[in-house]
Amino acid sequence: MADVWQSSMDHAVAVARKAGEMVRGALKDDRTVMTKSSAVDLVTQTDQKVEQLIIQSVKEKFPTHRFIGEESVAAGESCNLTDDPTWIIDPIDGTTNFVHAFPFVAVSIGFSVNKQVEFGVVYSCLEDKMFTARRGRGAFCNGEPLQVSEQTDIHQAIVATEFGSSRDPTAVDHIFRSLRNILCLPVHGVRGAGTAAINMCLVASGCAEAYYEIGIHVWDVAAGSLIVSEAGGVLLDVDGGDVDLMSRRIVAANNRTIAERIVKEIESFTLQRDDAPLQS
Ligand SMILES: O=P([O-])([O-])O[C@@H]1[C@H](O)[C@H](O)[C@@H](O)[C@H](O)[C@H]1O
Ligand SMILES: [Mg+2]
Ligand SMILES: [Mg+2]
């Protein structure tokens, strides 16, 4: 049966590739840094330009579609997911990596309809890996099918996580205690690529068993979440309930056994939701 969202997905792949070219070009000469919510929440003109490129090109082709873009939200746009077709964009996932030329940087585009992610595209632009997933039709990297790891023993697992961009000492204490719990299980290793989207693609590829983080935003994980589930993985909230992409918390794992084991070790905390009403 014809797929109603195929042309949108084709466009997402094409524009992600174009965006990736822009990121690679800018890596050489355009890394002037500004800050957002904290001194370590970085943004560059390239983040803003890439987001504009994606939004403009989508608007020309699909004028009725809506957008949630990281840099547009930073500039004051609302972050509410409706039932309308919505492009959820992180123009550069891994801005800190980009600023330091640490070689993991992604363009992440999720697309939701009726609040459900229909397709996800993550372009790891320095590795030239195009990760894609269409709901119900599998996940791929450069056209090759992806499958999560079959490991069910947490002691043989690699777990990815990040420290995020909050330096609030209470939040950092929670993060460290969770990390200590998991490291001392013990697990084979803890890793972090510096981008939520690529961490999730590593789970989808079977290179890591799980990824968890508190502090991410919907644009960090919308595309990656579908890539993980279409590769056979599971998504949970850090308390073990259903994942809520607006809640800023996620566990993405190869299977439920690993996901639930990790949940037991996480000291959870709550942050302001992405869709909280704007403060006036
Ligand atoms: O700001 P950005 O580089 O798009 O996204 C960040 C990255 O994904 C980082 O790995 C994660 O720890 C942060 O929580 C994200 O906000
Ligand atoms: Mg991001
Ligand atoms: Mg970003």
Image (cartoon, rainbow, N blue to C red):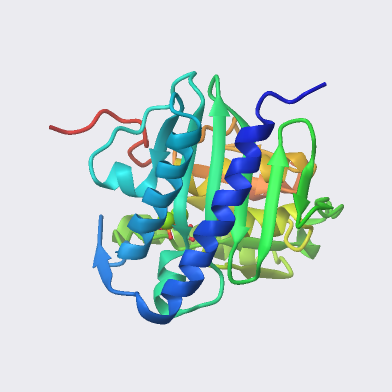
In the image, 217: left or right of 114?
Answer: left
Q: Is residue 269 visible?
A: no
Judged left or right of residue 203, residue 64 is: left
- Quadrant the C terminus occupies: top left
In this view of the protein, which residue sits in the foreground, 179 or 242?
Answer: 242
Q: Please state if 270 lies on the left or on the right of 108 as rendered.
A: left
Quarter residue 197 falls in = bottom right
Q: Position of residue 65 (x, y in %)?
A: 46, 27
In the image, residue 74 above or below residue 19: above
Where is residue 38? Give x, y as percent. Answer: 25, 60
Q: Ligand 3, what quadrant?
A: bottom left
Residue that extends furthest to the left in the rendered view of this protein: 280
Residue 155, percent across and down?
Answer: 77, 62
Q: Is residue 177 left or right of residue 117?
A: left
Q: Nearer the viewer, residue 182 or 109?
A: 109
* Residue 268 position (above or below residue 149): above
Tally of numbered discs: 0
Q: Residue furthest front?
A: 60
Q: What residue do we see at 74% from left, 52% from top?
A: 204
Residue 224: horizontal and vertical position, in percent?
61, 47
Q: Is residue 166 above or below residue 277?
A: below
Q: Quadrant of the N terminus?
A: top right
| Residue at (80% x, 51% y) in the render | 148
Quarter of the view holding residue 135: top right
Q: Residue furthest right?
A: 150
Name the residue: 45% across, 47% down: 54
Q: In this rendering, does residue 61 appear at all?
A: yes
